[in-house]
Image: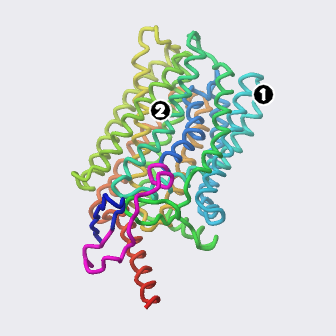
Amino acid sequence: MKRRMANDKSSGILSAQPLDSPSDVGSLKAIRKPKWYRSTFWNAFILGICNFLAPGIWGAMNSLGGGGQQSPSLVNSANALTFCLMVLTCFFSSVVVRWVGVKWALIIGTLGYCPYAAGLYVNNRYGDGWFVLLGAALCGLSAGIFWSVEAAIALAYPEPHNQGRFLGFWLSFRLGGQIVGGAINLGVNVNNNKAGSVSYHVFEAFIALQALAPFAGLLLSPPEKVQRTDGLPVRLSIGNSITYELKAMSKLFFSKHFLLIVPLIAQAVYAESVFFTFQALWFSVRARALGSFLSGVVAVTLGNILGKYLDHTKFSLKSRSRGAFFTILGLQGAWWIWATVLVTEFNKTNPTYDWVDQGFGKGFALFLFWVAGFQLNYMFLYFVVGNLAETQEEVIRICSLLRGTESAVQAVSYGLGSVSVMARTGSIYLNFGLWAISLYPAWLVISKIGVTLGDKKLAREEAVQESVLDNHSSDQQVEK
């Protein structure tokens, strides 16, 4: 159902009226200008801050290469444990949302990140590895909930015309953690041009930042209090039984369209351990810090450009989805060809590159493009699943499945990354193969977006509008 928006500047009120019922002027209540602390922009900002303080700082530690340690094997094993547990908690995320709601589920999801940073600190300073594994387990138990809920918020809170910008703005904060972490580490280790672990003082800053994440989550508006510029309510809750939710999750996972994009998800997220291990193996401490900082800047820039493109209504949804697919996956293939050539050479010569060394640029530039490509793939995956969900409840489920699938793949990726031969060359060859395998099944889905699949985001919004109109009409009949 299309609607016409009129703006009364003198009263600061917007009115929403369906085009197919012009006589029913009061069919939708007047839309007052959103209060700043209830607006979708404010909630995107708060979601971004939570992302910055929790997974963003986690990413900052990872972007140092092997969690900032001299050898990446322990941290790769810990990350494999984290992602294994995240598979479990992602699957049960819709159940948690049913119990405590979206806001508190997000807050619960931030609690496990700080212990993981503390574990890296203890290992870096005292050499005790057990705390890293304990922190990784606690992180996995909470992070799966966080990942699922934040993704659902990002898809359900914004107005349709702001979806891409919301995604880009939100995900920029995750990379903001990487940028800040890289800047801190670069300042502390600027004179360390050798291989090895970073200073433990870096982790003290990370612990302090991650401890703030639950408090930032308190500032998020629950769905029923969000005020959108189009006046439509945000309906993001689960009211079904636990058994129903588990059955619905299983049914959605085994649906044709979701199974077809599983290889696309796999090739995108497997790469994270690959390029961070690559960085830890072949670069000095200060070069790793510089890479953490610069790659975040590049990825934020390109991610926001992609977000604006995905919102650009000058192009049809069909054109936007296909254009993004060919560009992102085409570039990704180029990075894997480049990487295959480099690691085959590095495995023979065993270099440790610092920024003053000849040949530094060829590997460092690849790392920057890898991280940027990861961000673009990530955003594109949200765009795709957002065009598969039929209802707002299904948004929560499909985001949980997306994040659960990501976690399963990354558990395998980090687990294999703890094996020397896979860390040095094998994982890159494997990821190259995953990329090739993903192309055709992904195209079977992408080619239907904006065609037979239509515009699912718009369809969900129209369903909410119709529900509002029906409820308002019922209220009027009761009053009469």
* Secondary element at image label 2: helix
Magenta residues span: 16-42
Determine whether 188 is above or below 60 in the image.
Answer: above
User: Is residue 222 found left or right of 325 in the rendered image?
Assistant: right
Q: Where 142 sits versus 285, above or below?
A: below
Residue type of the residue flagged with mark 1: Asp
- Residue indicated by mark 2: 428
Q: Using residue 404 as the reference point, say whether residue 138 is left or right of it.
A: right
Image coordinates for residue 335, horizontal then vertical, percent: 38, 31
Whole-percent x and y of residue 197?
64, 19
Reply above or below: 111 against 343: below
Residue 229 in the image: state x and y as whole percent.
38, 59
Give the side of residue 393 with respect to residue 106, left or right: left
Cα gap from disc 1 to disc 2, whole angstroms: 30 Å
Q: Quick one: 77 or 150, which is closer to the camera?
A: 150
Type of residue at label 2?
Ile
Q: Residue at x 46, y 8 (%)?
A: 356
Q: Nearer the viewer, mark 1 or mark 2?
A: 1
Mark number, residue 128: 1
Rendered position, 29 above or below 174: below
Is residue 24 found inside the magenta-colored segment of the image? yes
- The stretch drawn in magenta includes residue 272: no
Taking the spot 69% from the left edge, 30% from the top edge, the residue there is 120
Query: Which is nearer the eye, 163 or 294?
Result: 163
Q: Residues within 10 Å of mark 2 (few under 14, many from 20)?
A: many
Of callouts 1 and 2, which one flags the residue occurring earlier in the amino acid sequence? 1
The N terminus sits in image quarter: bottom left
Looking at the rendered image, the quarter that the C terminus falls into is bottom left
